[in-house]
Amino acid sequence: MLPGVMIKPLRRFFDERGFMEAIRADWGDLMGEDRILQANLSTTYPGVVRAWHRHERGQVDYVAVKGALKICAYDEASGELDEIVAAAQDPSAIRVPGRYWHGFKAIGDEPAILLYFVTIRLRKAR
């Protein structure tokens, strides 16, 4: 994996609540010092590709999925490409530093719903 790209399995509660945590500020193993600035919800239809873009101001994207997506991150400097298949059957939160070119494709036979969180990096006090 490219440095900073991470996958964290999410815990589903198999009871009448149908509950699952998508992101938590106290997940230090995933979040580090990142802080969520905004949450977004996007629907992508089967076969649609949404790529390539990057965030040059330090934004990090955290992604949770309903449906199935192939998420890719590309490091222009090293030429390394990471491909992650994310599906609701095996839920995970995926961290993609915005410095990498990244995007995704809906690979299932139903629309993929992408819940993603974006961050700002807090500057350390001097």
Image (tube, rainbow, N blue to C red):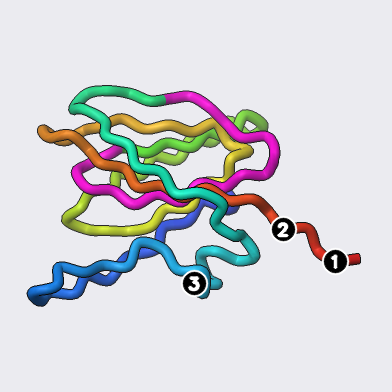
Amino acid type indicated by mark 1: Ala
Q: Is residue 54 rendered magenta in the image?
A: yes
Report how far apart the C-alphas of labels 3 and 1 lie in the structure.
Answer: 22 Å
Q: Position of residue 122 (x, y in %)?
A: 72, 58
SS at mark 3 in the image = loop
Q: Which residue is mark 3?
A: 27
* Amino acid type, label 2: Leu
Residue stretch in magenta? 51-69
Looking at this rendering, what residue extends furthest in the right direction? Answer: 126
Quarter assignment of residue 99: top right
Place of residue 62 in the rendered image (x, y in percent of width and height, measured from the top left): 46, 51
Give the mark nearest the N terminus, 3 or 1. Answer: 3
Point 25% across, 32% down: residue: 106
Identify the residue position indicated by label 1 in the image: 125
Between the residue at mark 3 and the residue at mark 2, the CA separation in whole angstroms equals 16 Å
Of residue 118 and residue 67, the one placed in the foreground of this image is 118
Q: Is residue 110 left or right of residue 63?
A: left
Q: Nearer the viewer, mark 3 or mark 1?
A: 1
